[in-house]
Image (tube, helix red, strand yellow):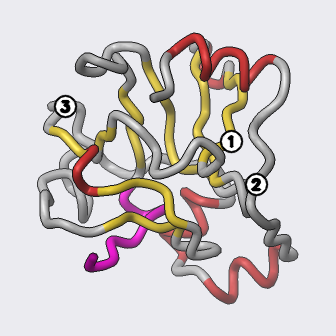
Amino acid sequence: MLRWIDVLKFAKYSNPEPPRRVEKTEAEWAAQLTPAQFRVLRAKGTESPYRNAYCRSYEPGVYACVGCGSLLFNATEKYHAISGWPSFTQPIAKNAIKYTFDDSYHMQRIEAQCNVCDGHLGHIFPDGPEPSGLRYCMNSESMVRLDS
């Protein structure tokens, strides 16, 4: 189980090795993704709170990166955080997520990216439920839910 101290160490020193790498040009990403997906996944945008596909969705399955298909989260780790975005307590695997420091908008946060394609997923915070205390606050546009 990952904890906040693990996330900080990954962001500061070195992220887990990804299982594979997917690299494309911005033109290739733009051709593959919808404009909304591209704005979030590649331009590090944020979708509107509460008006996104997975905020209030709790169906079983797994969530994968919309860019490269890498598995990110299991629906069993999803919870109602009242944040306006889908929230999870743990990634599906230790090496599914890449962590980077983000000081945009005069805030100090940790960005969560797909560890395979570097797509922006959202941010992670230390205010989630126990036992991990983590809240992966993700954008629906960066993920697709697959039936299990």
In the rendered image, which residue does mark 2 sit on?
A: 18
| 146 in magenta | yes
Instruction: From this view, report whether residue 102 is shown above or below residue 66.
Output: above
Looking at this view, is 128 or 30 the one in front? 128
Contact between labelled residues 1 and 2, with CB atoms less than 8 Å apart? yes
SS for callout 3: loop
Looking at this view, is 26 or 63 the one in front? 63
- Compared across the picture, whether 73 is left or right of 7 comes to left
Real-space CA distance between mark 2 and mark 1, rounded to the nearest whole angstrom:
9 Å
Disc assigned to residue 130: none
Determine the image quadrant of residue 141: bottom left
In the rendered image, which residue does mark 3 sit on?
A: 81
Residue type at the position of mark 3: Ala
Tally of numbered tags: 3
Which residues are drawn in magenta? 140-148
**Disc with the residue nearer the chain's start (2 vs 1):** 2
**Residue in the picture at 72% in, 16% down:** 9
SS for callout 2: loop
